[in-house]
Image (cartoon, rainbow, N blue to C red):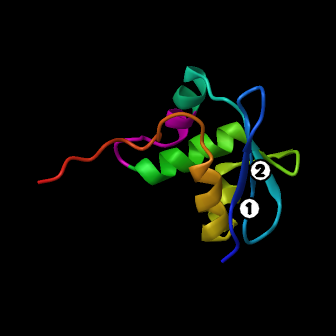
Amino acid sequence: MTEQTSTIQKDGSRSVVLPVSGRTAVLRVGKGRDMRLAARHVNPSQDPIGYAMALAAQLATIDGAPVLPEDLDEMDMEDVSALMSGLPGKSPLPATSSP
């Protein structure tokens, strides 16, 4: 396992070196509209992981290219986890209550 490298830029965006592919993902600072657009693709209450992946895809570029949620489906899980951990702000995943 390669150590994750993440850097916060002056504009608040985050650069994350993906540990398996070695490619660089940049996650821009999100807006409310990004959450709304991600929720159009995936219902957060029915599929919180799918929603988080849709939001990550909405905010990310990898090596300067835009990312689709389908692209994340085909990426190595370790790279996807690194990308999602770089999401700015609080976790987009809804809180779950314990029984």
In the image, farthest residue toward the right: 64
Q: Is residue 33 left or right of residue 8?
A: left
Q: What quarter of the picture does the N terminus occupy?
A: bottom right
Characterize the local packing of mark 2: few (<14), some (14-19) or many (20 or more) Cα atoms within 10 angstroms: many
For label 1, the residue is: 18
Provide residue 24's location: percent of width, then percent of height.
82, 54
Q: Earlier in the sequence, mark 2 or mark 1?
A: 1
Q: Is residue 19 left or right of residue 43?
A: right
> Start and end of the magenta stretch?
38-46
The correct choice, above or below, for 68 with respect to 17 in the image is: above
Is residue 35 located in the magenta-colored stretch of the structure?
no
Residue 7 image label? none
Is residue 40 located in the magenta-colored stretch of the structure?
yes
Q: What quarter of the picture does the C terminus occupy?
A: bottom left
- Res. 79 image quadrant: bottom right
The secondary element bearing badge 1 is classed as loop
For label 2, the residue is: 25
Identify the residue at horizontal 62%, vertical 47% (top origin): 86
Q: Amino acid at mark 1?
A: Leu
Identify the residue at horizontal 47%, vertical 41% (top origin): 91
Identify the residue at horizontal 62%, vertical 69% (top origin): 78
Q: Amino acid at mark 2?
A: Ala
